[in-house]
Image: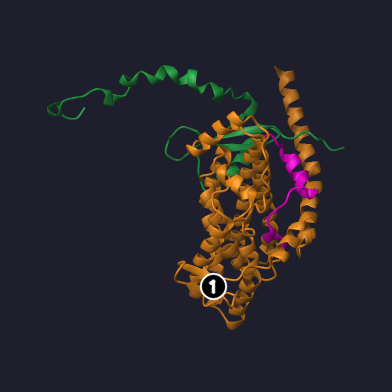
Chain colours: A orange, B green
Amino acid sequence: MYAQMVKSEASQDDPVKLAEFQARIDAGEKIEPKDWMPDGYRKTLIRQIGQHAHSEVVGQLPEGNWVTRAPTLERKAILLAKVQDEAGHGLYLYCAAETLGVSRDEMTEMLLDGRMKYSSIFAYPTLTWADMGAVGWLVDGAAIMNQVPLQRTSFGPYARAMIRVCKEESFHQRQGFDIMMKMCNGTDAQKNMAQDALNRLWYPSLMMFGPSDKESVHSTQSMAWKIKISTNDELRQKFVDQTVPQAEYLGLSIPDEHLKWNDEKGGYDYSEPDWDEFFDVLKGNGPCSVDRIAARQKAWDDGAWVRDAMTAHADKKAAAQVAAE
Amino acid sequence: MTDKREWPLWEIFIRGQHGASHRHVGSLHAPDAEMAIKHARDVYTRRREGISIWAVPANSIAASNPSKKGPLYDPAEDKVYRHPTFFNIPKEVGPM
């Protein structure tokens, strides 16, 4: 998902306090920043929320790629609004992570030097306008699948950020599907573009949920702490079951010859993505991994003088106010 | 020379369309109050969520201590008569 393969941290805390903490979570209480929490809970959440925030911010890049080339003024305005939302989502999440005692600048530096990750999906290129449709439809669709349950996560600031994000995310998915509908009702060439976008983005979208975590220790701990609500496989299955009929409506075919309705489980059987590719992308070897971090580094470096100037201006104003008093 | 200080944190409160109180919506970083309000406009009112913004320096907020919530709220616990439903009003009196 937007936070993939988040390693949980073991806690070396007092067992009595740990048990009390777990009882609060089991009772459905929200944990707030100033409450006592196990060290592992804090560290795991910083990693998870940080990765989620970075994904929102890096996720602006593949779409920003098409802002100047959107086919109409209206599509351009819509895409701009969506990209602006992603920036907002990043901000909500950074603020939630900061309540755990990590600073915004630290998180930015950890993204830039590779200590923190962002979702594998954004290491893929957006080659045609149809990709804007497929990204909204599939990538935002997958994100919603993950974020809706996270509104119930145990950490208050994270849950509240997710509530805001979910309110806005539905527009993203629908605008993507709208682009796909337009392309699919267009010329043969346009419909082929839509099919090509689905072909390229289908498996990377399935990878967003992360590999099967049925036997993962990290997942078990995170689920006990309610910072992960559903397993990766549950979410992926839900995503496939929801998306296949939508593809049928569009008249597109899912690029999976083994895709088949399974009456017994009440869901589709589908092929797993190439997990070797996934791990390679996470290591920073995706088709656009180098470009993405380079773009973030450039934005950070080029913005330095603006940040400095604004701080200097605020200092000057504050000094003038003191002098006037 | 790059200034390594981070912009201070502001807590943002917004009043919606219908005259309700300002409500806490989240926080953000800004160098001063004026920029905090501009950022809050961009971050928290992209869909006409509000008609008034307050920005408060986060370090100016005094907060109760969560671990002392027992003793702090205890006095309210045994005063159920503060709720109207404590009193039984006979049916024949009508709505009250």
Instruction: Identify the residue at image location x=65%, y=65%.
Output: A204
Figure quadrant of residue A98 = top right
Residue farthest bottom in this picture: A188
**Position in image of residue A38 (x %, y %):** 63, 34
**Residue shown at 35% from the left, 18% from the top:** B79
Residue A279: which quarter of the image? bottom right
Please tell me which residue lies in front, A152 or A125: A152
x 72%, y 65%: residue: A276
Residue A248 lies, in percent from the top left, at 50, 75
Q: Answer left or right for A229 relative to A11.
A: left
Q: Is residue B24 visible?
A: no
Q: Amino acid at mark 1?
A: Lys
Instruction: Say whether residue A105 is magenta.
Output: yes
Image quarter where the N terminus of chain A lies is: bottom right
Element class at badge 1: helix
Which residue reaches farthest left? B92
Q: For the C terminus of chain A, which image quadrant?
A: top right
A272 in the magenta segment: no
Which region is colored magenta?
A: A101-123
- Measured along the vertical axis of the image, is residue A9 above or below residue A267? above
Q: Is residue A176 visible?
A: yes
Q: What residue is shown with label 1?
A: A182
